[in-house]
Image (tube, coloured by chain):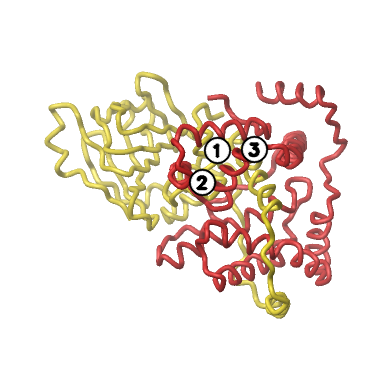
Amino acid sequence: MTKHHPSNDCLMEHAAGSLPVAQAACVSAHLSYCERCRRTDSQLKTVGGALLERLDPVPVSEALLDTVLARLEDPVPLTYTGQTAAAELPSLLQRLINGDFSQLVWKRITKSLSISYLSTGDTNYEFALYRIAAGGRIPEHTHGGGEMTLVLEGGFSDGRDSYHPGDFIYRDAEDTHAPVALDGEDCICLAVLDAPLRFTGWKYRWLNPFQQLHAG
Amino acid sequence: MVENKSDSETDSGRGWSVPTGRRTDEWSECLVQIGDNSDRAAFTRFFRHFAPLIKAFALAGSSLSAAHADELVQEVMLKVWQKAGGFNPEKAAASTWIYTIARNCRTDMFRRLQKFDTPLAADDLNIELEGEEPFTVLHTRRGSDRIRDLMGQLPPDQAQILAKVYMEGKSHSEAAAELDLPLGTVKSRVRLAIQKLQVQMDRQ
């Protein structure tokens, strides 16, 4: 059972379809773990439906109806099967990864941190998987912007709390943190960033010039 | 779960008693007929009711041209025909179901028009309630019916913000800029509206 969830504002923007695709993908992945947020999402979509019913109708021509009726028997391009909750890994991630974690190219950043960048086509956000070795630490860092994190495997702790698969964490630009993976297994997280991470400790600060946003 | 408890208290307090989750509203029945029997007459009725609303949705925030709005109506209505078989009246109202389709089609159309290339279609990011316990489904369903009833009672300033966010697809900060309101005011109106609609959310 997940303990950490997106904010109400975030769930609402998701239901209204106004989140950028990279962030929307992260929230969707959380929904596939979290029944409670799925229920909220379902009700928030109901709000959308109720608002739709109250719009002032704009007339549509009979010709458009005829066009649609004539196309009803067109072959359906690809039957969409929909997302179902809680497989091993959210299916949208499986598709972006093209398989499982073993197929990924990991870029080693420090002894305990490797990153694998995925492409959502969104050039404002970096969408990446972070792998922290069991018990390993990501050096203390901050970001120029916001960071969404979703735990996929293992878990980590940041001194405030510990986080497990399905947990969703949002940190803003002011936040400095140094997550430590829990012992026993590597921790894999999805991270969505709108600015590159910046190490704050003297030991790792030299790495900063090499940190750039891998968006796209 | 805590919110279950508080919600059922509200339910009994207001005398809500829906024996089954089955909806009997006209448009849900219409969708079932389309899905079960490929009923063109039912589809035509559904089209005449919803196509003008979808067109209004397409034009909300005047973001699409009239030609693109018609194209969106066409796409949404074809999806209605193709997907009606998967519509489950126990889980969603017809308006919620078609809103989700329209929202996803509009998002994809925006991205297409902006030549924004992504491997993820809006449909891929839509997670439905699946395989939930019947009690949960019923409970969620009742909450949804209540939301639709309460929508008519929202004060205009709150309804206006919700419409900006949902119908025009604006983020909270975009809505604030357009209405010339502080972001905090927009967020608190949204929060009040959501509370009044009794959407089950975390108290934050």
Q: Earlier in the sequence, mark 3 or mark 1?
A: 1
Q: Earlier in the sequence, mark 3 or mark 2?
A: 3
Precedes in sequence: disc 2 or disc 1: 1
**Image mark 3: chain:** A
Rendered image: mark on residue A180: none
Quarter of the C terminus of chain A within the rendering = bottom left
- In this rendering, the answer to whether A142 lies above or below B50 is above
| Disc ID at residue A33 | 1
Output the letter for the chain in yellow. Answer: A
Query: Relative to A38, does residue B30 appear above or below in the rendering?
Result: below
The reply to whether dot 2 and dot 1 touch (C-beta < 8 Å) is yes
Q: Do discs 3 and 2 share a chain?
A: yes
Q: Which mark is residue A39?
A: 3
In percent of width and height, residue B125 lies at 53, 51
User: Which mark identifies residue A90?
Assistant: 2
Q: Are marks 2 and 1 on the same chain?
A: yes
- Quadrant in which residue B105 is drawn: bottom right
Q: Where is residue A147 shown, x and y percent of the image?
A: 36, 37
Q: Label 1 sits on what residue type?
A: Tyr
| Chain letter of the red region | B
Name the element at disc 3: helix
Of residues A28 and B30, the one nearer the viewer is B30
**SS at mark 2 in the image:** loop
- Label 3 and label 1: CA atoms lie apart by 12 Å
Total labels drawn: 3
Does dot 1 land on a helix, a strand or a loop? helix
Name the residue: 77% across, 37% down.
Answer: B142
Tell me: A137 left or right of B3. Answer: left
Which class describes the residues within 10 Å of circle 2: few (<14), some (14-19), or many (20+)? many
Asked if badge 3 and badge 1 are on a common chain, one would say yes
Closer to the camera: disc 3 or disc 2?
A: 3
